Image (cartoon, rainbow, N blue to C red):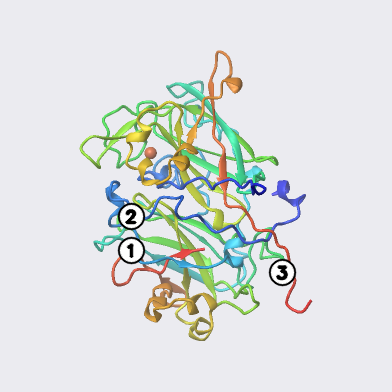
Amino acid sequence: MSDRQNHKPETGAFFQRDRDWHAPALTPGYKTSILRAPQKALLSLDNTISEITGPVFGHSMLGELDNDLIHNFAKPGESAIGERIIVHGRVLDERGRPVAGALLEFWQANAGGRYRHKKETYLAALDPNFGGCGRTITDDEGYYFFRTIKPGAYPWPNGVNDWRPAHIHFSIFGHGFAQRLITQMYFEGDPMIWKCPIVNTIPDRRAIEQLIAPLDWSNTIPMDARAYKFDIVLRGRRSTFFENRPEGN
Amino acid sequence: MVQELGYLKETASQTAGPYVHIGLTPNFCGIPGVYKSDLGASMVNDKTLGQRITVKGRVIDGAGMPLKDALIEIWQADAGGLYNSPAEMRGTADPNFTGWGRCPTSAEDGVFTFETVKPGRVPFKDGRLMAPHITFWIVARGINIGLHTRMYFPDEAEANAEDPLLARIEYRHRAETLVAAGTAPSYTFDIHLQGEKETVFLDI
Ligand SMILES: [Fe+2]
């Protein structure tokens, strides 16, 4: 909370979402969307105070290992199995400004492509030292980082032989509830990205490329962990040119 | 040629998938010990001002089945009509009320439950008061981008009748999809993804 008290609060409405850039609700190649996609037109309107505002999460809520998936579920002295990686980047808004104090939560399969979930049926083994969730909050410049193992690819029931490319799920909380976003990060060089029905719900290739984190050789830690850089962009806030003055003033 | 605007594009949304509960409510889904408690599990404490209410509901798909793998977040004003947010310039909200809640739908019957307070009225952009409402955000497997909607109260007919957002709904019977059932302090708000009773979702 203290991070943001130094800044003048921003109260502008958010840029309208570009609905042609995001996946549409109905994407038959991703079968589950068929019965879960709203069929009627969305009601479009400008933000009100109910969407411009949003809760604040303070750094004080974070535990020491929250951003370390290699250790946050592991027994003392042990660690998760897999390729050690650092994921880092910035949360920016559409105006290119850093989003400080953004809450990022992430979840992923283990190195074998298995999730720790009772509905998960893939035969790959569970790792007793890997839970699969973590979180962090961006600093004043919008930076974040966490440590994990590279998740494995996994098969899923959609087509007969559909596989998810290796990915990390991200949930991002910016400054206004209208910015709320969930997405997935992919890894540079993975040929499976372009075969995935969930990736391909997104109509614009550039929007998909924006989800692929490049290997960041410069930030790779020798003899320890490779780095991947993943920047996230949230909706920008409109300037409050004349809006904060009640009529007549 | 003109100057470039230089804006970035918003990161594209992707479905929360079947295991969103691992990431957002790990204690609920059998991954204890990473966090002390699940975020958003509690919105109130014993000092919170206002009328306590319970909001229960389900998210129902086009085949009439409740989603058991969905996650719901809500955001609302406090009893006095103030948001607990730095962007709230009209005053200071009740410090004992977060205004934000998060709840998974249950694996058994798909029900979500929020223990909260009835929100006060907040102004629309032109200063008119909106009716008391709770903002809902729904994510799940099969939903490519989180769905925004609002819940209004059945015992606020007068305020609902003058609410600027409800007034924008062209087909009047569809406005009822945003009004909960029940009476204070227990309300039910079922969200229908498709069909006759499809909830009005917002591009906001
Ligand atoms: Fe996944």
Give yes or no for contact between labels 1 and 2 (Cβ–Cβ under 8 Å): yes
**Nearer the camera: disc 2 or disc 3:** 2
Kind of residue at badge 1? Gln
First in sequence: mark 1 or mark 2?
Answer: 2
Relative to the observer, which residue lies in front, A127 or A210?
A210
x then y, percent, for residue B106: 35, 55
Residue B72: mark in rendering: none
In the rendered image, the residue lying farthest to the front is B1
x then y, percent, for residue B150: 48, 68
In the rendered image, the residue lying farthest to the top is A223
Report the residue marked by disc 2.
A26
Relative to the observer, which residue lies in front, B189 or A235?
A235
Mark 2 packing: few (<14 Cα in 10 Å), some, or many (20+)?
many
* The residue at label 3 has a CB less than 8 Å from ligand 1: no
- Would residue A20 be found to the left or right of residue A28 on screen? right
In the rendered image, the residue lying farthest to the left is A160
Report the residue marked by disc 3.
B90
Report the residue marked by disc 1.
A39
